[in-house]
Image (spheres, rainbow, N blue to C red):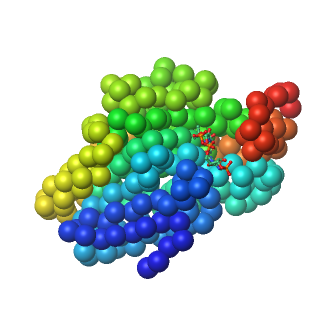
Amino acid sequence: MAYETLIVEVEDDVALIRMNRPDALNALNSKLMTELSSAVQAADRNDNVRVIVLTGSEKAFAAGADVKEMAGKSFVEVYFDNLFGPEADAIARVRKPMIAAVSGYCLGGGCELAMICDFIIASDTAKFGQPEINLGIVAGMGGTQRLTRFVGKSKSMDMHLTGRFMEVAEAERCGLVSRVFPAKDLMAEVMKIAKKIAEKSLLSTMAAKECVNRAQESALSEGILFERRVFHALFATEDQKEGMAAFMEKRQPQFRDK
Ligand code: HXC
């Protein structure tokens, strides 16, 4: 199947899904999220696929949800749309092993998407962050819950409250990333790892995934639902409009706590 925002290849039991919006650093718009959730679900159903790899470009895995698409939305719209909730949940429900191969910017919804995958392999150029705070919102695709489970409360608070970017050495040190390779070798190394997993019994790789996720899951869905509602609610604020307008106008935001 041909996609507008993705390039999908299946080779040697591995589905490689590449996000492809180069002009927007792979910002996640509705089209991309809809296509991504159908592509991963199709790979999950495909008997020729045993492992899924999700990646972006060398410059960006994904620089977050598309601010230009979101900026004008109201609370009522994001609440009724449940913005990216169903797509993210569908991706999280994939049963086959799914690896995120991250180079460059991995921010906001991009970081959240990488964390929905089973583990993250990164290049030495990867930069992780939850910079939603700079837009007058919070993470809305699981970031406050999953990052905290990956790296602990202190670093997660630091990331969510300051919006700073984390270089890959720190990300590996604190357990966000499982392995790091030079950018030029990343995809070859990730494909080797994916093929190694594909050689195992699919029954046991799927079972292992299910078991490891059990260790993470307690009350996660409650936390994500809570976060989603808070994310929606922030679209009722002037600061969200200001934060996103400032981004598009390439200036510093003037927040007024309204
Ligand atoms: C829309 C984006 C974008 C985004 C980059 N672009 N990120 N467009 N949404 N998230 C666009 C830019 O507007 C620009 O388009 C082009 O991509 C290149 O980006 P530049 O900013 O010129 O590149 P650079 O100076 O290298 O800076 C890279 C960057 C910066 C540091 C990654 O782009 C940035 O801060 N992006 C926003 C990151 C962010 O706030 N993410 C969180 C979003 S909220 P033009 O047309 O100007 O060339 C979120 C919530 C998720 O993710 C919750 C979902 C439910």
Quadrant in the picture for residue 149: top left
Query: Which residue sits at x=71%, y=56%?
Result: 69
Residue 115 appearing in the image: no
Question: Is 46 positioned to the left or the right of 66 in the image?
Answer: left
Question: Is 194 positioned to the left or the right of 68 in the image?
Answer: left
Q: Residue furthest top?
A: 154
Measuring from the top left, give residue 48's x and y in whole percent: 25, 74
Residue 257 appearing in the image: yes
Quadrant location of ligand 1? Answer: top right
Measuring from the top left, give residue 209's x and y in whole percent: 28, 51
Q: Nearer the viewer, residue 189 or 119?
A: 189
Query: Which residue sits at x=80%, y=52%?
Result: 72
Q: Nearer the viewer, residue 176 or 57?
A: 57
Q: Nearer the viewer, residue 215 or 79?
A: 79
Measuring from the top left, give residue 204's x and y in whole percent: 18, 57
Which quadrant of the rendered structure holds the C terminus?
top right
Quadrant in the picture for residue 237: top right
Query: Which residue sits at x=31%, y=75%?
Result: 46
Quadrant in the picture for residue 207: bottom left
Question: Is 82 positioned to the left or the right of 74 in the image?
Answer: left
Question: Is 123 positioned to the left or the right of 105 in the image?
Answer: left
Count how many numbered circles sit on residues in the image: 0
Measuring from the top left, give residue 136's x and y in whole percent: 73, 35
Which quadrant of the rendered structure holds the N terminus?
bottom left
Query: Which residue sits at x=66%, y=57%?
Result: 82
